Image: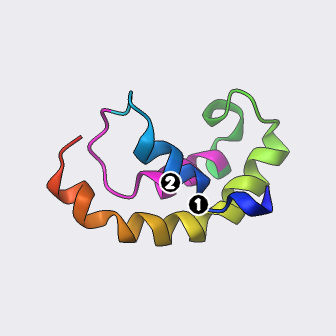
């Protein structure tokens, strides 16, 4: 789990079925995991979801910031 920082951002940016047009999608997903752990994650227990979302928030924010020009250019 500790070697997977930024995974949420990476997963959201590389998923082929993401048609969402928001910027900072990894941060948004991490905040959903922390704020609504029972509905945001279908496979993680709520306690693990909150911990993972909290630990992954800053690395995902950094990766989303690096990918921001691409997100603004390419309308998904």
For the C terminus, the quadrant is top left
Q: Residue at x 71, y 33 (%)?
A: 38
- State which region is magenta: 19-33
Residue 47, image x, y percentages: 84, 46
Residue 74 on image: x %, y %: 18, 49
**Residue 17 spot, x, y in % from top left:** 38, 27
Q: Secondary structure at mark 2?
A: helix
- Does the magenta segment cover residue 22? yes
Does residue 62 appear left or right of residue 55 in this picture?
left
Task: Indicate whether 69 appears above or below 25.
Answer: below
Q: Which residue is mark 1?
A: 6
Q: Is residue 4 left or right of residue 68?
A: right
**Point 74% across, 29% down: residue:** 43
Q: Are marks 2 and 1 in contact (CB under 8 Å)?
A: yes
| Image quarter of the N terminus | bottom right
Disc 2: which residue: 9
Alpha carbons under labels 2 and 1: distance apart: 5 Å
Under circle 1, the secondary element is loop
Check residue 41 in the rendering and tell me which mark sits there, or answer none: none
In this view of the protein, which residue sits in the foreground, 32 or 5? Answer: 5
Q: Residues within 10 Å of mark 2 (few under 14, many from 20)?
A: many
């Amino acid at each position: 789990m500790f070697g997977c920082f930024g995974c949420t951002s990476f997963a959201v940016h590389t998923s082929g079925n993401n048609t969402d047009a928001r910027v900072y999608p990894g941060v948004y997903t991490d905040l959903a995991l922390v704020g609504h752990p029972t509905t945001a994650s279908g496979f993680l227990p709520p306690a693990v979801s909150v911990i993972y979302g909290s630990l992954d928030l800053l690395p995902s924010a950094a990766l989303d910031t690096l990918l921001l020009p691409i997100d603004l250019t390419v309308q998904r």
